Image (cartoon, rainbow, N blue to C red):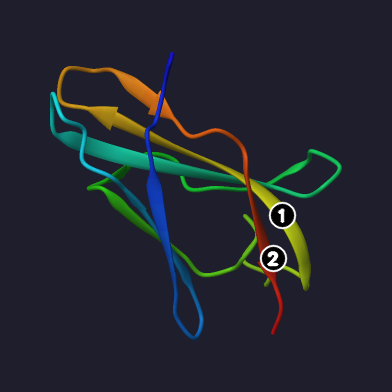
Amino acid sequence: MAWLAGISLALSAQSLDFTAERCALTAIVSVRLEVFDLSGRKIFSSGPVEGATYKWYLQRDDGRPVANGVYLYIFSVRTADGTELRSSVGKIAVRR
């Protein structure tokens, strides 16, 4: 598996937008976001979503809002040629 070169994050009032930088060789077909607590438990997985951006509404898989704190994430993309690219593990802080 190859590594994703870069992503951008944009915070709005109730969500966090993850956007993959365009791949030089091929188009991005879908993205996936996985979020983990600091003990490594997966608390959210978007599954594959079409496009290069995913809007996370700061909720767990069960729909409950995440608590204030620090979370880890992995953002993956699938390109038109079927290659999966993955970000390194990133950190985000949620504070409302």
Where is residue 84? Give x, y as percent: 35, 22
- Residue at 38% x, 26% y is 85
- Residue at 28% x, 18% y is 83
Which amino acid type corresponds to the residue marked 2 in the rendered image?
A: Ala
Per the image, the residue denoted by label 1 is: 71
- Quadrant for residue 82, please give it: top left
Where is residue 77? Give x, y as percent: 34, 34
- Residue at 43% x, 13% y is 1
Front residue of 74/32: it is: 74
Numbered disc 2: secondary structure: strand
Q: Is residue 24 left or right of residue 68?
A: left
How far is the residue under mark 2 from the one under mark 1?
6 Å
Per the image, the residue denoted by label 2 is: 93
Where is residue 27? Give x, y as percent: 13, 33
- Quadrant for residue 6, please give it: top left
Query: Is residue 57 positioned above or below 25 on the image?
Result: below
Residue 41, label in figure: none
Which numbered disc, 2 or 1, marks the residue that appears first in the sequence? 1
Do the residues bearing badges 2 and 1 touch, measured as CB atoms within 8 Å? Answer: yes
Query: Is residue 3 positioned above or below 96 on the image?
Result: above
Where is residue 14? Give x, y as percent: 51, 81
- Quadrant for residue 18, please give it: bottom left
| Label 2 crowd (10 A; few <14 / some 14-19 / many >=20) | few
Which amino acid type corresponds to the residue marked 1 in the rendered image?
A: Tyr
Numbered disc 1: secondary structure: strand
- Residue at 61% x, 37% y is 89
Q: Outermost residue toward the top?
A: 1
Q: Is residue 51 left or right of residue 16?
A: left
Front residue of 57/63: it is: 57
